[in-house]
Amino acid sequence: MHLIGRYALVGVTHFLCTGLALKVLSYILPCFLTCYYGCAAKFLMCAIVAQLTFGFTKKKFLSDKIQPDNRAVLITGCDSGFGLQLAKRLDKGGYHVFASCLNPNGPGADDLKKSCSKRLQIVEMDVTKDDSVKEAVNYVKDNLGTSELWAIVNNAGIQKGFITELTSIQDFKDTMEVNAFGPVRVTKGFLPLLRQSRGRVINIASLAGRISLPACAPYTMSKFACVAFSESLRYDLDVWGVRVISIEPEFFQTDMTKVENLRQRVDDTFASIDDDVREDYGKKFIEDFRARVNLMSASSKVYKVLNALELAISLEHPSLVYRPCRNCIVAVLYRIFEYSPKVMQLLMVKFYFYITGFPKPKEADNNL
Ligand SMILES: NC(=O)c1ccc[n+]([C@@H]2O[C@H](COP(=O)([O-])OP(=O)(O)OC[C@H]3O[C@@H](n4cnc5c(N)ncnc54)[C@H](OP(=O)(O)O)[C@@H]3O)[C@@H](O)[C@H]2O)c1
């Protein structure tokens, strides 16, 4: 507390002195320079307001859609969640859908077979395996018929691991393998087809690809990597006319965010902790953490993610990044957090932990 108090005092004093120095500068600078600063400030304000409101103008004047006929879309991870729903929606919209499933005989694939048109084809694909991806690429090539591959949606994802010290290195590796290397492997496989159609790569990253989530290092690392992949790939593929679009949703209700699944993953993660570490964190901490794992309650408005995905696939002029969010207040709060200085972010997380009564490890105070 003493350290934080001193840090805050020095920070606030620095802030006030900077303000004072700028005020003094405005008196002693020649008039034409202060005018220049005034113009620069107005220009900056105009740029910010234009950026914030461009979405409305774009919706009104840049909403032309492409025709779905003879356009194929491949989606990974269609066994459940966003992938399953998107496959159904695109099939209804007239696209030729290749719904890739980890388990082509599982309930998700069965649901798709029953509820979709004959156009939709199930493809088996494990995004962590080179051979599986190669086979899927060959299957799509052989079954395109008169269609061209217009888009791939890298949707498959997992969430494993929580607090770093209580998470095995294997959980980190598994998460990176699916969420970060999976999109790279699949994109590389399908790029020759996408270059022919001048199509689209759509990567489902996450809010956790821009903001670090507390107690969720493996997933956050993998989604930051996924966002970085989209941004680098966009430069690489511009010359081929292939667009790269990043979809970055916040928390929505799917299998991944179901409380019982989260609790099961907490149990799996904590099962392999070393005894001495378990002792330092304490039984109560582990029980309380498990009980509060659903603090970030997920929104039921899954259609917001599906809408963003559909726009990314179908608009003539799609945005490069979509950030589906349950409402604008939550969206603004996330933006404020994202652009705050790191020390402010730390204070906000501490405050959040404090007001929500987030558990503290048994020995944490003793070590300060
Ligand atoms: N839900 C959210 O709040 C949220 C927020 C931001 C981003 N996302 C991202 O959105 C994407 C879809 O997640 P979701 O929420 O729809 O969760 P989900 O229902 O768990 O869907 C993930 C899908 O990926 C599949 N999958 C897992 N490992 C795979 C592999 N190695 N190869 C191929 N497929 C694999 C899963 O198959 P099984 O079911 O057979 O394991 C499942 O069908 C993920 O990338 C996730 O990170 C979700």
Image (tube, helix red, strand yellow):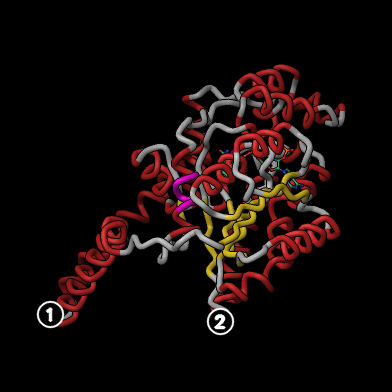
Q: Magenta region, mostly helix, strand or loop? A: helix
Coordinates of residue 86 in the picture (x, y in percent)? 56, 45
Q: Nearer the viewer, residue 196 or 305?
A: 196
Q: Secondary structure at mark 1?
A: helix
Query: 248 and 310: which one is in front?
Result: 310
Quarter location, residue 193: bottom right
Q: Which residues are magenta?
A: 306-310
- Residue type highlighted by circle 1: Cys
184 in the magenta segment: no
* Residue 20 in sight from this viewpoint: no
Ligand 1 occupies quarter: top right
Farthest left residue in view: 31
Q: Residues within 10 Å of mark 2 (few under 14, many from 20)?
A: few
Which residue shows up at 62% across the image and 76% down it?
A: 196
Among the 4 quarters of the image, the one containing residue 242: bottom right
Q: Position of residue 89 (x, y in %)?
A: 52, 44
Q: Find residue 10 and report its horizontal and vertical position in percent.
A: 42, 50
Tell me which residue sits at (70%, 42%) in the image. Answer: 158
Query: Does the beta carbon of the residue at mark 1 sit less than 8 Å from ligand 1?
Result: no
Work out whether 122 lies above or below 195. above
Up-down relation of residue 206 to residue 17 (above or below):
above
Residues at marks 2 and 1, CA–CA distance in whole angstroms = 47 Å
Q: Is residue 153 left or right of residue 323?
A: right
Q: Residues within 10 Å of mark 1 (few under 14, many from 20)?
A: few
Tag shown at residue 31 = 1
- Check residue 159 in the rendering and tell me which mark sits there, or answer none: none
Within the image, what quadrant is residue 216 found in? top right
Pointer 2: what residue? 239
Residue 159 rendering spot, x and y as whole percentages: 69, 40
Of the image marks 2 and 1, the number of the one nearer the N terminus: 1
* Residue that appears at 85% across and 31% down: 272
